[in-house]
Amino acid sequence: MALIESLRFGPLADRTDLDVAVALTKLLYEDFVSYGTDGRDRRLDDEGVVLVIKAHGAVVRRLALEVPAWPFRTFDGPQGFGTYWRKNDMSGSWQARRDCVEGILGPTRDALEELQELEYESRFKHGPAGSFKNLIFAAVGPKPEIVLRDAVNNNVEIVRNAENCLVYSDPLPPHGLTWRQMVAWWRTHHQPDADEKTAADALYRRLYRSLDSLPEQLVLRTYCAAYAETDGFELPALIPQVYLHYDPYTRRSGKQSGALYRQRMDFLLLAPDRSRIVIEVDGVQHYGRKNPPDAEGRVTYTAVPQLYSDMVAEDRRLRLAGYEIYRFGGWELTQPQGEGERILTAFFTDLLKRHRKPAP
């Protein structure tokens, strides 16, 4: 009990006051409920419960919460719970005694749970900004033409080629978007009679069709191979060809309406720690301009500083908007003997370790 007594004078070295307050609230709640019902499983005696109530009050006060008002201080005796319930017409009802304990400690428990949630939320590296509207992605064939109808509310409309793309507008879970959730969305909207495995295969094939670059195809194949592993369906979904303006966390605040530029991310991953991760695969066209074939039919490229500048300027804008951006050169992903796949496997392993959901 010396440890309990010390709590009246300051926090413990290895436990936060919040953790201690939650534990003491649970201990007091369960012991008084036990005493008021069958009397079994109590861990405290009268002397111990007095010390715990005092320590509990000190810790709760340090958390700037209201300290419970106790109409009794012990289990037995003149100031005990038993005496209190007999004086207040609870002798014939276990439920009435439970309700009494709930009335004393319930508000404190609820306030502590709110603090726990706030503390938990603070562990996230990137909190979401803006509000979810939709994801427009994986276009096949002619690209969709998208019009911004209301810039303030980020209301958009696909006015042409809507049938060629996918639109995810279900409520976004608070901790990212998993492959299982994407498959559930696909089944609901595109393949309602399919089982999960069949729908997952169909969705993967549909996403793969949206990629016409061999390096991009390798990225999707390498990442999605992990879906076949144990708990693989709980991994974040890797979403290809996402139209930049309409991802879940970006809101345009301009005052004009009208057609928007065709800006896309190669891949978007909404991680469990709420990070927004963009993966780009850069072919030579990202930094060079194609020259006419020479006399022997060989094609070369000339470096164009403006193309490179435009690319890094967009990277800066995205980072300021809260994204993480990772770029791969198309060349490194087309090396022989599986080198590209090894590079990607190592990258995704480290990326997923870094962006796990914070421990509660």
Image: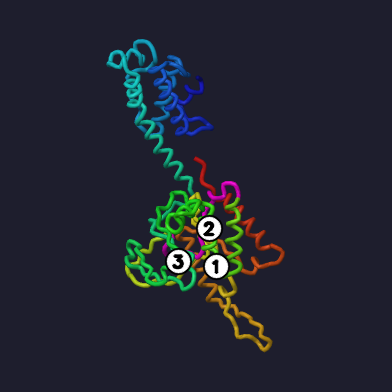
Circle nearer the viewer, 3 or 2? 3
Does the stretch in magenta take in 332? no
Label 3 – label 1 distance at C-alpha? 12 Å
Rendered location of residue 164, percent (x, y): 45, 68
**View extreme (right): residue:** 337
Rendered location of residue 247, percent (x, y): 44, 60
Please name the amino acid that badge 3 sits on.
Cys
Label 2 – label 1 distance at C-alpha? 13 Å
The quarter of the displayed image where residue 84 is located: top left
The 10 Å Cα crowd at callout 3, few under 14, some 14 to 19, many 20 or more, is: many
Please name the amino acid that badge 2 sits on.
Leu
* Residue at figure coordinates x 44%, y 45% from the top left: 121
Label 3 – label 2 distance at C-alpha? 16 Å
Q: Which residue is mark 1?
A: 211
| Residue 27 vertical position relative to residue 195 in the rendered view, above or below | above
Q: Out of 323 and 214, give the one closest to the viewer.
A: 214
**Magenta span:** 229-248
